[in-house]
Amino acid sequence: MDATEFRKRGKEMVDYVADYLEKIEKRQVFPDVEPGYLRSLIPDCAPQDPESFEDVFKDIEKIIMPGVTHWHSPYFFAYFPSASSFPALLADMLCGGIGCVGFSWAASPACTELETVMLDWLGKMLNLPEEFLAGKDGQGGGVIQGSASEATLVALLAARTKTIRRVQSENPELTEADIMGRLVAYASDQAHSSVERAALISGVKMKSIPADDTFTVCGSALKKVLDEDKAAGLIPLFFCATLGTTPCCSFDKLLELGPICNKENIWMHIDAAYAGSAFICPEFRHFLNGVEFADSFNFNPHKWLLVNFDCSAMWVKKRSDLICAFKLEPLYLQHDHQESGLITDYRHWQIPLGRRFRSLKLWFVLRMYGVKGLQEHIRKHVRLSHQFEHLVLQDERFEICAEVVLGLVCFRLKGSNELNKALLKSINEAKKIHLVPCHLREKFVLRFAICSRTVESTHVKFAWQHISQLATELLKTWEQNHHQQ
Amino acid sequence: MDATEFRKRGKEMVDYVADYLEKIEKRQVFPDVEPGYLRSLIPDCAPQDPESFEDVFKDIEKIIMPGVTHWHSPYFFAYFPSASSFPALLADMLCGGIGCVGFSWAASPACTELETVMLDWLGKMLNLPEEFLAGKDGQGGGVIQGSASEATLVALLAARTKTIRRVQSENPELTEADIMGRLVAYASDQAHSSVERAALISGVKMKSIPADDTFTVCGSALKKVLDEDKAAGLIPLFFCATLGTTPCCSFDKLLELGPICNKENIWMHIDAAYAGSAFICPEFRHFLNGVEFADSFNFNPHKWLLVNFDCSAMWVKKRSDLICAFKLEPLYLQHDHQESGLITDYRHWQIPLGRRFRSLKLWFVLRMYGVKGLQEHIRKHVRLSHQFEHLVLQDERFEICAEVVLGLVCFRLKGSNELNKALLKSINEAKKIHLVPCHLREKFVLRFAICSRTVESTHVKFAWQHISQLATELLKTWEQNHHQQ
Ligand SMILES: Cc1ncc(COP(=O)(O)O)c(C=O)c1O
Ligand SMILES: Cc1ncc(COP(=O)(O)O)c(C=O)c1O
């Protein structure tokens, strides 16, 4: 395929994508396929000779689409949103076309520099403390990670190196292995599994801090565990605070936790993967109060800020902390400007070496929506979740299981976990909408997350009527079965 | 921006990308900008109100392009190639449009299933042993990682868990911390820095195995270090063999190393990030002989197989080894089919949670080039590197520093490292072509890597004439300075 054919096919693909997104509502949100469906539809091995674009293109509807879960359908209410917008798609086309690999400044200066400046823009939108911005000669700054999981891991690795050095300088008799065996990291028992995973990867012990009745970790809960652990000779090094937990979007109390971490030499990382986008609205910014105590902060524009996956924004107060956890410098990666101090080599900030020109997506989206357009998007989702909450509250059979703050509603039928599992099963088997569950303490709970960019009040109303009707049907047979027993 | 405007702007972007790639030769391969150039060209913060696409689009040439290193210019001979092709660009547009997040089978079945089947296709193209393929019910299989760095890390983490369990079951008196402190991983002293980094991240000691005069690690070199380390009470757990080292594209001797690793319970991972693509050609496949002894194998289609970044292909013999290193299972990520055994949940195979529909790129490229088309691409690059080698050999002032096997030529002026540094400086300051250096033992060496998909014999000839002319100029002044001293 040459540039001439690419012009033609590229335009066909633009139309295909536009059609797909324009009419996505008409597709069944969750596919009918059974595991293994795809293998039987395609050949056993790659063709020896080239096939035409037409042949490949035809197979998209025949082979791929029947197995796609449509994350951008307005009937998709599962997990958390995965962002999608037209400006981001355009930027990603450009990113692919340029196809540079930005592991160092010299490998493509624009790729590095736009990222630094975009993270400053975004940091200002969130009203992050000055220390987190790169500015012209700041010690902090931002970076785009592929995922929140990686951001947490990178923060923990930086904390690990920093703590080992500090403890070793205070206790020269201790070996690195001695110290490693005593390190312990913390997060809420409501934290995302990626935090435990980061601890597993880095070989650091991990303990859960019990959240309170509102699924929030407060200062005293952390303090209690810290005191016990220190008395037992452990070395606390890392606390991951969650703003917007995955199960029910609760918020840890930064203003209580931060000062404790600072006093105890504990690296505080903030994981606001989903909720962080909302902090661009002044009315939600207060959840971030206390960020000034944190060492690093992360949220995913690829969740809720209309920037397509992958774009996870991370800031640190001291970039040297990250770099020290990683820096290795073979000759073929060195370049002239290296000693100037002006240069950022992002490979020292992340797990992979290679990196795409992802900041283009941020640039396009921030400019083409403007701060106001993005605030509107957030506010609309929050309005819709409150609409759903009100519908649930009007039905005596149901209960709301956690405070509705942003775009997530946790709800359930008053009754057993089995009953609620049966309800979820009937919802997902009908395939008119798609939801996933969570556990809140011992309760099995349904999560209703406002996800799609194009979801409207009518979709939410439809979803509720559908759920409530399935509940009516379920309760009928459920009671019969119950009576028969 | 709505779908209607996206249709229009998307087509403009397709033309822009086509123009960019068609005429890339006319752009200066390496930019003129100084560090910090970009910040002064754009506002301090994001706009409150939306800007038009036209305004953003204009800024691409004004702000971005002046700072881009053009990796796809036929005058780019630096690092290793970063793949780019039109079919891959089309597939990435589709991937962005669908915008699903494939962390589990249910999150989008097509995303997971196409990946499994494409990795089988690719594995067959490389003639990988059956055990590495997923097939209908194999124990092995492939996965797309974001980068070779991540593949190595994931392999090392799997080895770590496996070894700790084995040693603990043999020596119940040892704690995990005891074992961790004695683990040691190995790779060639020519291995990529990402291997050392993986060891750093996972908290495992790492030792270099000295390569021989041809920059190759052979069995006896590994054996010697192993014997010493075991005698000193260390526990060897991991050896990363490199096929196609970054400095000079040398190949570790799998057939000698593999049996040693198997006998000593050492996980053998193969990093063939660049060279792996060549193994689709029968004449280069012999370098992979011995892969049957490996536990995991990885190469980057995003380097040399015309699949745009990011697409790093990794295979394991036992998928359960990866999964055991990671598996954590919160409720909101569970789904019905989970216990069927047919399901692959790729989040257990990787560092991040989220993942894009990257296998579409492989599917498009493998079908639209066909195996023969891809073989042609590899062979053309190998021919061009031999052409360059011959040009160098005809010039008595120069020497070739390592055997030229694939698309990389390591060469230098016969003379001091300072002389060669000066030559590289004059090449990169002229900005007609772009190269990066490496060290081979104590020698400073220039690397000439055939990179662009569109590079032809004429570009190689031009590059050589240019280098040789700069060498002539340099040698003149160099000798004068030398005489003056
Ligand atoms: C609070 C929180 N942290 C982390 C993650 C993981 O995000 P990623 O896929 O970017 O690693 C999620 C995903 O839902 C999340 O909700
Ligand atoms: C042999 C080798 N391994 C690993 C890598 C790192 O690749 P990635 O950017 O995919 O992590 C490279 C990059 O050049 C390489 O040459």
Image (tube, coloured by chain):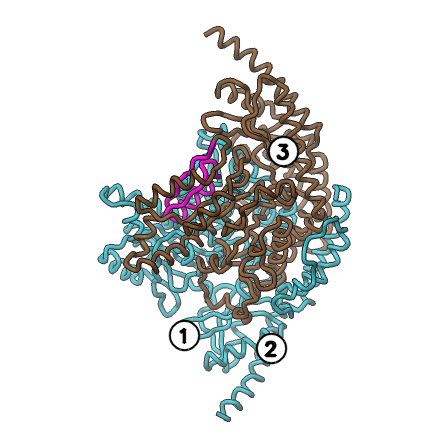
Chain colours: A brown, B cyan
Give the residue at mark 2.
B465
Residue A389 or residue A481, whichever sits in front: A389
Give the CA distance from mark 2 to mark 3: 62 Å
Q: Which residues are magenta?
A: A183-212
Q: Tags 1 and 2 in contact by the CB under 8 Å rule? A: no
User: Would you identify the image quadrant in which residue B18 lies?
Assistant: bottom right
Residue A163: x percent and y percent?
Answer: 39, 54
Give the CA distance from mark 1 to mark 2: 27 Å
The disc labelled 3 sits on which kind of residue? Ile
Left or right of B275 on screen, residue B254 = left
The disc labelled 2 sits on which kind of residue? Gln
Q: Is disc 2 placed on a helix, strand or loop?
A: helix
Q: Do the residues at discs 2 and 3 belong to one chain? A: no
**Does mark 3 have its CB less than 8 Å from ligand 1?**
no
Instruction: For marks 2 and 3, give the one nearer the viewer.
Output: 3
Residue A341 or residue B16, whichever sits in front: A341
Give the residue at mark 3.
A450
Residue B255: x percent and y percent?
Answer: 35, 56
The disc labelled 1 sits on which kind of residue? Glu
